[in-house]
Every structure is written in structure tokens, then in C-alpha cells.
Amino acid sequence: MIDLYHLSAEVKKVVLDDKQITKLLNLYFMPELLSLIKSRQSSRIPFDENKPISQEDIHKILEAGSWAPTAHNMQNFEVIVVNDKELLEQFREMELPVSETFIRENYLQLSFSEEELKKKKTGVLGTMFPKAWLDHMIMPAKETGNVPLNIIEPRNQIYPCPTLFILLYNPQKRAPASEGDFLGIMSLGCVLENMWLMATSLGLSMHVISSLSDDAAEHEIKDKLNIPEHLKIAISFRIGYTAAEAKYTRVRRDLSDFVHYNNYNEKEL
């Protein structure tokens, strides 16, 4: 895959004005960008702990995040990069609780065959759930959400990785007139996507760990990393080189499934 970061820097060395550079980059990058977007995925497998990420690549990922669109350009986020092996091991030893709500709602997004997944076009295969959970689940629960609660127990959710990114935000600084700070939270998603696409372009893999934002885990992490009390952990993600290829059946809805033209009831131009 082409290193978009370096190629963009080379183009800027040519004597062109900003509009000419933008037009040239757009013409060249459009097909490459769509391919990059499609290749981005969650790698739910161990990463090579003994293959560190270069400081140069970490800087590129952080710079990509810094240029993400945010509501009113508030840039209401901080990033902690954790690559200290002792700290990473401490995080891996944490017992991360799995809530009943998570089990019930996540279970409803599962398919139990590739055929079912391709037909639904949303969700993930049941094999992405821990085997200990699946062994106790029964098919009727898929429709009712009645998952046996005896499978809800703490487990180690953090696979090995050389680097962990923790994205923080200040909930006391909401985007103007944004109920529940919807625009501010959406902005954090833009930051994550920029980082993820840059990481993918560099041949790196990522995996979001939502459980690190739970109250109990967050309290322990904030204590270990001296994070100020007023800040919240929004998103945490592992990043690194995969020890093996991550192979998943990935699905997306067709454009005709969700696009409407001028009127919700109109599906065609």
C-alpha cells in the first residue's frame, strides 16, 4: 500500500500553489483512499509485543488525529500513548467486568453462520464472542436477549500489544447547544477514524477496547497514569503488527439499503 503521508510531503516540494496541490492529490488519492477505507478493520487477535512501533509512525498517527474535524474546532481531547512494557502488563492483568447489558445487547448483533451474516449485512459472526460465553448460550436467546447470566464473569480482554492509545475528553466542555454533547462525542469518533486510517496506511492494526471506559477500569487506569479527575476515558485501542493474519467475514449494507433521495420514501434518483 502506498504511504500517503510521505507521498503528500514529496508533492509539496514541487512548485505549485495550494489549489493545484489539492487538485493533484485528490486525483491521485481518491481510488487509493477508498481502498484504504475498505481495508480498515478491527483486529481481534494478539499483536507482536516484540515488534515496537517507531516514534515516527506514532507521530504520524497522532498528527492525523490532530487534523480530525471537531465541533467548533474545540479539539476537546488528550491522548496518552502507553508503550511501557511494565504498564502494558499491568493492564493485561486487570480483571475487566462484562456487564449484563453488554452481553444481552451484543448477543443480538451476532450471526451464527456466514450465510446468516451475509444475509443480514450487519453485525459480526458469533465466533468473535469468547468460547466460554458461546458454550452456555442457547439459540432462543438470539431473539429474546435472555442470555444465561452465569456466563457473566470478569475476564482478561486485552490481547498482547506493543502500544496502547487512550483518548481522553473533558465532559465539562460540551459543544455549544449540543444536548448530551452529541457533537463532541461525534468529534471523538472523527479523531479515532483519522488515526485508524493512518495506522492502516502504515501497515499497522488496531482494536478498540471499550471495557477500559467502564467505571471500575477507568478508575484504576486513571490512578496508574495520573489522569486528572475531570477527564474521562472516551476510547482506548491497541495498536501494533499482527502476529498472524486477521481473517474475518466482513459485511456492509448496499447503498440501496440506506440511501434515500430527496424523500425518505424515494430510493432512486
Image (tube, rainbow, N blue to C red):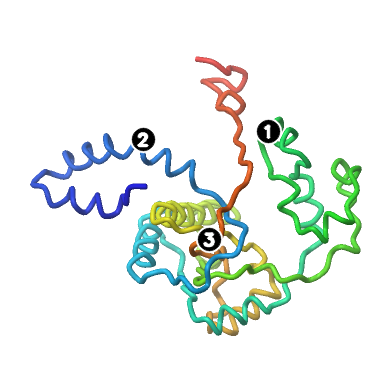
Disc 2 marks which residue? Answer: 31
Q: In this rendering, is residue 45 above or below 29? A: below
Within the image, what quadrant is residue 161 found in? bottom right
Question: Mark 1 is on which residue type?
Answer: Lys
Q: Are marks 2 and 3 in contact (CB under 8 Å)?
A: no
Q: Residues within 10 Å of mark 2 (few under 14, many from 20)?
A: few
| Image coordinates for residue 30, horizontal then vertical, percent | 34, 36
Secondary structure category for the residue under label 2: helix
| Image coordinates for residue 119, horizontal then vertical, percent | 71, 30
Q: Is residue 124 left or right of residue 78?
A: right
Q: Is residue 248 left or right of residue 204?
A: right
Disc 3 marks which residue? Answer: 242
Q: Residue at x 40, y 54 (%)?
A: 198
**Alpha carbons under labels 2 and 3: distance apart:** 26 Å
Disc 1 marks which residue? Answer: 118
Question: Mark 2 is on which residue type?
Answer: Pro
Within the image, what quadrant is residue 103 found in? bottom right
Secondary structure category for the residue under label 3: loop
Secondary structure category for the residue under label 1: helix
Q: Tell me which label, 2 or 3, sits earlier in the chain.
A: 2
Farthest residue to the top: give it.
269
| Image coordinates for residue 94, horizontal then vertical, percent | 69, 78
**Alpha carbons under labels 3 and 1: distance apart:** 26 Å
| Image coordinates for residue 168, horizontal then vertical, percent | 52, 68
